[in-house]
Amino acid sequence: MNTMKLQRFVPAGNPSRINTSRFGERPLWFRPITIIKVAEQSSGSGLVEDATLAQKKRELYQAVEGINRGIFGIPSAKKSEIESLVKQLESQNPTPDPTLDLEKVAGCWRLIYSTISILGSKRTKLGLRDFIALGDFFQTIDAVKSKAVNVIKFSAKGLSLLSGQLSIEASFKIASTTRVDINFEKSTIIPDQLMNVFRKNYDLLLSIFNPEGWLEITYVDDTMRIGRDDKGNIFVLERFEDDSNL
């Protein structure tokens, strides 16, 4: 917008008088009309809010570095730090009614933090202590079909050919402006060799990653999404553009 079209000049008897403001030095007879001042203040407030969100997101990314998404447990102090940052972001959610704008939620996301944990005997039974390594966690949401697919990548240490994934398909329906109800539909593991590794404890594996229940979408913007489920878990995901390997 050309702001000069919105400015008016008021002649004054002493054009040499100078007023100093946050816009720099200017003669007192050069005064923007009120609408310009209001626009500047509003824009400034928005910039401050955007900067605060960006800073909190950076702090959250830093806090979750090197903890393997929290899946194998983290110190209580670290957990408190992360959850404090999550709450601060939730309090400034730029999309307060996410289910009314599901395009914001649709697409591919990668998990960067969750309070779901695999500890003790569960980790041992699933071979996740020594033999099997966890890769990325992805979630792809189809807003048109009301479907979601969770993909958990695995690889066997020392056996480069034995890598694959667990896929869990679910449907969802809108329960409120912030909540969706999720129904488990089916799961698959590929390749068959990986299924053979998990077969004995497959029910245990599904019990950990089964998304059935409800999910509250507590924060979403163009690059980050946060949710809380009916089991008390927190999920923080980042948008992932390249889903060619899913």
Image (spheres, rainbow, N blue to C red):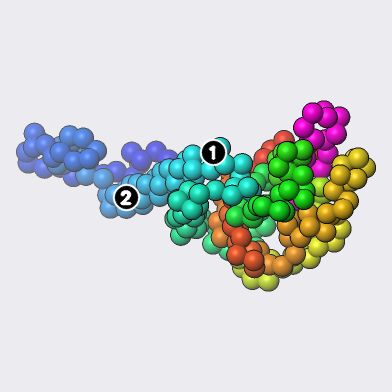
- Comparing 213 with 173, the one in front is 213
Residue at the spot 86% in from the left edge and 44% down from the top edge: 197
The amino acid pointed to by label 1 is Glu
Q: Is residue 100 left or right of residue 161?
A: left
Residue at the spot 18% in from the left edge and 36% down from the top edge: 26
Q: Is residue 205 left or right of residue 38?
A: right
Residue 150 image offset from top left, x and y in percent:
76, 51
Where is mark 2, residue-wise? 41
Q: Is residue 61 left or right of residue 24?
A: right
Q: Quadrant of the N terminus?
A: top left
- Comparing 209 with 194, the one in front is 194
Circle 2 residues within 10 Å: few <14, some 14–19, many ≥20: few
**In which quadrant of the rendered view does residue 219 lie?**
bottom right
**Magenta region's main secondary structure?**
strand
Residue at the spot 11% in from the left edge and 42% down from the top edge: 12
Magenta part of the protein: which range?
Answer: 147-165
Circle 1 residues within 10 Å: few <14, some 14–19, many ≥20: few
Where is mark 1, residue-wise? 65
- Please state which of the two labelled residues, at mark 2 or mark 1, is closer to the viewer: 1
